[in-house]
Image (cartoon, rainbow, N blue to C red):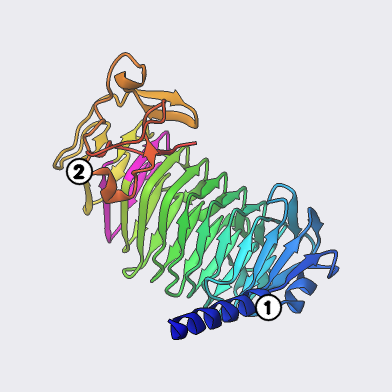
Amino acid sequence: MFKATVSGTLSFCLFTAVESAAETIRVPGDQPTIQAGIDAAGDGDLVLVSPGVYKETIRFNGKAITLRGRAGRDRTTINASGLSGPAVMCRDGEGPDTVFDGFTVTGGTGFRSQTGSECGGMYNAGSSPTVIDCAFVDNRVIETDRRWAVGGAMLNSGAGPMIVRCSFVENIALAKNKFCPGGAVFNENGATPTFIDCQFIRNRAGSGGAIANYWDASPTMINCMFVGNRAAGGAVWNLGRSSRTTIVNGLFLGNESSVHAGVLFNEDGEVTITSGTLIGNHGGSHYGSAILEYGGTVTLLNSIFRANGGDQAIYGRNVSISYSNVEGGWPGEGNIDADPLFVTGPLGDFYLSHVAAGQDEDSPCINAGLGRVRDYGLKKFTTRTDEVRDRRAVDMGYHFPRR
């Protein structure tokens, strides 16, 4: 009894000592700039930034700290306009305990190499930071005399960041008046980023208006939306036999390409889209106005594919589609070709019609997918306008978060 009491007391004291060792450094109260706050912090500390616009670029320098905008991203901005280098850098072995939370990042123009420019917004190299509730807006990697410009908002090189509830809006990658890969995000050198509940809106690039994956990069994207991105080759571009892109519960709406596919241009890699809704996407004059497989494999499961422009919206010899609603039909187990009966709900226009939710008839996509809701992590999501969650057999298509 005595030993247990002593042990518990020692554990409590040690925990309290560790907890009390963490400090909160306030910007601009304790330090005048965000970088000064980072420099003054030690592992476990919180750097808390007051609302405002901070004209600087920052580097975490390998520290396991939390950098947080006190009032959130709508009121706390890092503006790197006119400055050299990416707005935010994690290139010193940062891990998941390095947290970047609650900022808008804008005006980043990246750094120059022998071949061009890279990464305007956030540069992650050999690191795995956690990025939460941030907005990357109007970062531009633009080259006038060199051939290469990639990653308008973010570049992940050999990195595995966790990116949660972030938005990437109107970022650009452009070289010699030609758009280059990764208007919002460029992944390379074995990068394995995970994007959860993120939005990619109106980004522009040559290939991968929203995201480009080069050679052995393998991102995972869960509950993400891709809206109005423009590129010569796809909102998502995948290159290289070792590149494996996994998308679960994705909404692709109004993405455009001037040459290849509006949604996906896959060259030799592997892409899997599960529980996707692909609507109103348009490509150029080449085959595959929405999806073009040019080597590698593309797999669609439990998805809805409608109103995508062009004579041939899907093109490729290694495209596998099953348990999906495909306009014009597609060979594969469980596939249908029927009006999905979309209705407008609390968060958008592509909920499914449910009699139980007050509509006149049921969508043919209800309970028509393969497997159960829990198999895809969709137990807290819904296709119903009354926001009753999907249960048991999974519905086809994108599932909205419940408010």
Say the numbered circle drawn on residue 129: none
Visible in this render: residue 392? yes
Number of the front mark, 1 or 2? 1
User: What residue sits 65% from the left and 55% below the top?
Assistant: 102
User: What residue sits 36% from the left and 17% below the top?
Assistant: 358
Q: Is residue 143 above or below residue 11?
A: above
Along the viewing direction, whichever of 189 and 57 lies nearer the viewer: 57
Residue 216: x and y in percent read 38, 71
Q: How many numbered discs, if any?
A: 2
Residue situated furthest left in the rendering: 333
Q: Could you say whether the residue bearing mark 1 is in a helix, strand or loop?
A: helix
Along the viewing direction, whichever of 297 and 46 lies nearer the viewer: 46
Q: Could you say whether the residue bearing mark 2 is in a helix, strand or loop?
A: loop
Cα distance between the residues tagged 1 and 2? 51 Å
Residue 328: x and y in percent read 24, 31
- Describe residue 350's horizontal placement relative to residue 273 as left or right: right
Give the image quarter of residue 13: bottom right
